[in-house]
């Protein structure tokens, strides 16, 4: 596979996440965004926030930059009841239950900011950059290419989960 083909595939995949976040949120009330299928399940709002947060932090790390969450003030705009560096990993059910929604439009806007940074990173990668080791704690060591695929896979899974929960919300109407 050529570097150009890899770039095109990654841009397409991340573009689908970018398009999917506002689609899954559109038309849902705040109560619907926060509805949970059971007491330990994640809701649409948490899922789309988390998929964007993990993408933002991991892409920022790969680019050697500060995340959009901090650099562009998204942490303040969302006003979540968590420490500022929270990504959503290892959060308890009670933590998810404390999630708040100030403005549903923030989810799509934040994903757009994250997507712009992601696209800039991907467009700047060459074959050597994909092979750069970014985490030597694993065997085999994690390369930038593997990390980018992991970020895309995680975002895709969470978007699918959010779409499923949205479907459950719509069936309750």
Image: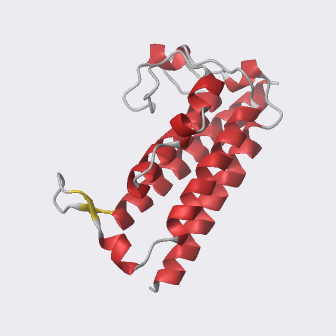
Please state if 75 lies on the left or on the right of 34 as rendered.
left
Q: Quadrant of residue 146?
A: bottom left
| Percent position of residue 43, x then y | 60, 27
Query: From this viewpoint, is residue 50 visible?
Result: no
Q: Nearer the viewer, residue 45 or 131?
A: 131
Q: How is the image coloured?
A: secondary structure
Of all residues, the one furthest to the bottom in this rendering is: 2
**Quadrant location of the C terminus?**
top right
Q: Nearer the viewer, residue 90 or 141?
A: 141
- Please name the residue shown 74% across and 36% down the image: 25
| Percent position of residue 134, x then y | 28, 58
Query: From this viewpoint, is residue 102 visible?
Result: yes
| Percent position of residue 93, x then y | 46, 18
- Please name the residue shown 43% across and 60% down the image: 148
Give the answer, above or below, for where 167 lies relative to 113.
above
Give the answer, above or below, for where 18 lies relative to 110.
below
- Please name the residue shown 43% across and 61% down the image: 149
Please state if 6 lies on the left or on the right of 172 as rendered.
left
**Quadrant location of the N terminus?**
bottom left
- Please name the residue shown 68% across and 48% down the image: 112
Give the answer, above or below, for where 117 lies relative to 11.
above
């Amino acid at each position: 596979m050529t570097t150009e083909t890899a770039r095109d595939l990654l841009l397409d995949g991340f573009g689908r996440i970018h398009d999917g976040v506002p689609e899954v949120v559109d038309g849902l009330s705040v109560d619907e965004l926060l509805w949970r299928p059971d007491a330990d399940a994640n809701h649409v709002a948490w899922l789309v926030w988390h998929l964007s947060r993990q993408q933002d932090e991991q892409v920022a790390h790969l680019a050697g930059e500060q995340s959009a969450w901090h650099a562009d003030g998204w942490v303040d705009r969302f006003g979540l009841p968590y420490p500022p560096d929270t990504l959503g990993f290892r959060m308890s059910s009670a933590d998810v239950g404390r999630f708040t929604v100030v403005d549903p439009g923030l989810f799509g806007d934040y994903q757009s900011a994250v997507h712009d940074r992601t696209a800039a990173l991907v467009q700047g990668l060459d074959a050597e950059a994909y092979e750069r080791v970014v985490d030597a704690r694993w065997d085999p060591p994690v390369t930038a290419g593997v990390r980018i695929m992991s970020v895309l896979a995680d975002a895709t899974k969470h978007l699918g989960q959010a779409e499923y929960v949205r479907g459950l919300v719509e069936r309750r109407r």
